[in-house]
């Protein structure tokens, strides 16, 4: 019996086991089409971008560790890596670009001067693959961010520079969504904050509100673009005060009907990020997720199938929030094969959603509402040893991508033939 036949046989047994719990696995696999993950382009090159040949990541406590060989250094190399990643993933993907990844043709273009023409080749690339694009203003790794402030800066020249940058990014985003026929989510995150305790917190936050009001003043059709704002609790070098806190941005998002971006690395280590989803969606129409794996701080490790990621997926699936949640990733590991990190992290996120869909939620809620807490706990525990892996493998076979650990050999082959020669 061949490998595919064994997978189908295992799936049939799993299908029957889940059916006894009231779960239709065939329907679940169809529903997985709704899980569209926006791949963060910066995993391929350690958040360097293409503005200058020697660009380095800096600002707001973000950093990449490791120097594993094979980093993408050109748009062509990045696109080749992305194509390889997507060839090893089931399901549907989008691509999330930062503004520093424009097609600048070898010329330096400052961020208050970027235009659609610098991203048209990305739009064409995405159109050829039938996928959407998302976008981010890049308010870090720039001389005008070296003092720790961008949109909240008290240096009016610098503040205006960053406002113009965000304005241009939003205009580009709207055109991306228009040309590709799917809304582009534009996310704004800034590294602004102070290392030691400030006196005028209010002044910086008033400036940030003023800048956002100016930058987001032009309204674009929602079928073309959506705005998101992203908080952070702290960063290395800005430990005492982050201007764009969760409280600030949640208030701004509710008042202005923008998306709130929840990055799973941007909160205190003891906060349960999955718990925030149903709270925020009581008051805003949509969320943007940046799924990552923090270890003690916002370290952006490769996503693994852990309890934090599982709760995020479960909260979304249990409440039918998929149409209201834009799923993106945000990790960058330069200590291992970058393509392998990409594939492993994305598949882990996809597995979390599949597991969530294989849950008999209605029965669990029935136990919960009846006060049958033992029964609820016991059923949740039994679900942990259900044959989810058989369903996942079958899903991969259906999608025409490697199942199980078979993608490891494909990544190693790509490293030997492509990455090692860079």
Image (cartoon, helix red, strand yellow):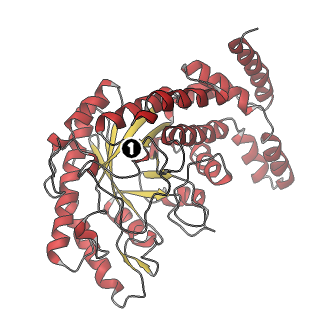
Q: What percent of the width, then of the height, locates residue 240? A: 45, 82
Residue drawn at the location 16% of the way across and 57% of the way down: 110
Residue furthest toward the top?
1
Q: Is residue 51 left or right of 241 when viewed as pictured?
A: left
Residue furthest toward the bottom?
199
Residue drawn at the location 35% of the way across and 35% of the way down: 77
Q: Is residue 375 left or right of 75 when viewed as pictured?
A: right
Q: Quadrant of residue 148?
A: bottom left
Q: What percent of the width, then of the height, locates residue 365? A: 72, 47
Q: Is residue 245 left or right of 157 when viewed as pictured?
A: right
Q: Quadrant of the N terminus?
A: top right
Residue drawn at the location 61% of the way across and 19% of the way down: 397
Q: Quadrant of residue 232?
A: bottom left
Q: Quadrant of residue 156?
A: bottom left
Q: Is residue 109 left or right of 339 when viewed as pictured?
A: left
| Whether residue 230 is situated above or below residue 202 in the rendered picture | above
The residue where tag 1 is placed is 41
Q: What percent of the width, then of the height, locates residue 235? A: 46, 71
């Amino acid at each position: 019996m061949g490998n595919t036949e064994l997978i189908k046989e295992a799936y049939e047994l799993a299908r029957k086991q889940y059916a006894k719990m009231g779960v239709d696995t065939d329907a679940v696999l169809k529903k997985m089409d709704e899980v569209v993950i926006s791949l963060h382009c910066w995993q391929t090159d350690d958040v360097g971008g293409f503005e200058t040949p020697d660009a380095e990541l800096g600002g707001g406590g973000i950093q990449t560790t490791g120097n594993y060989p094979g980093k993408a250094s050109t748009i062509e190399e990045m696109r080749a890596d992305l194509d390889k990643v997507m060839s090893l993933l089931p399901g549907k993907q989008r691509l999330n670009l930062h503004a520093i990844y424009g097609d600048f043709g070898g010329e330096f273009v400052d961020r208050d001067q970027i235009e659609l023409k610098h991203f048209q080749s990305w739009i064409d690339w995405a159109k050829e693959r039938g996928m959407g694009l998302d976008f981010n203003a890049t308010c870090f790794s720039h001389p005008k961010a070296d003092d720790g402030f961008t949109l909240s800066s008290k240096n009016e020249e610098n503040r205006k520079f960053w406002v113009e940058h965000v304005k241009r990014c939003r205009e580009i985003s709207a055109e991306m969504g228009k040309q590709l026929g799917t809304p582009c989510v534009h996310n704004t995150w800034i590294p602004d904050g102070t290392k030691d305790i400030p006196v005028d917190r209010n002044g910086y936050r008033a400036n940030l509100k003023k800048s956002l009001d100016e930058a987001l003043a032009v309204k674009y059709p929602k079928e073309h673009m959506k705005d998101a704002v992203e908080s952070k609790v702290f960063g290395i070098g800005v430990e005492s005060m982050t201007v764009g806190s969760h409280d600030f941005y949640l208030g701004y998002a509710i008042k202005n009907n923008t998306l709130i971006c929840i990055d799973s690395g941007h909160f205190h280590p003891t906060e349960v990020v999955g718990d925030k989803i149903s709270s925020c969606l009581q008051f805003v129409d949509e969320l943007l997720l940046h799924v990552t794996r923090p270890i003690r701080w916002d370290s952006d490790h490769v996503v693994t199938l852990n309890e934090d990621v599982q709760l995020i997926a479960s909260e979304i699936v249990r409440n039918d929030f998929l149409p209201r949640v834009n799923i993106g990733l945000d990790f960058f590991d330069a200590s291992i094969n970058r393509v392998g990190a990409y594939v492993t992290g994305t598949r882990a996120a996809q597995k979390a959603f599949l597991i969530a869909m294989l849950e008999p939620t209605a029965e669990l809620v029935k136990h919960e509402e009846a006060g049958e807490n033992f029964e609820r706990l016991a059923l949740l525990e039994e679900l942990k040893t259900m044959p989810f892996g058989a369903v996942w493998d079958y899903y991969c076979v259906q999608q025409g991508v490697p199942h199980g650990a078979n993608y490891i050999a494909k990544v190693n082959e790509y490293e030997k033939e492509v990455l090692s020669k860079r």
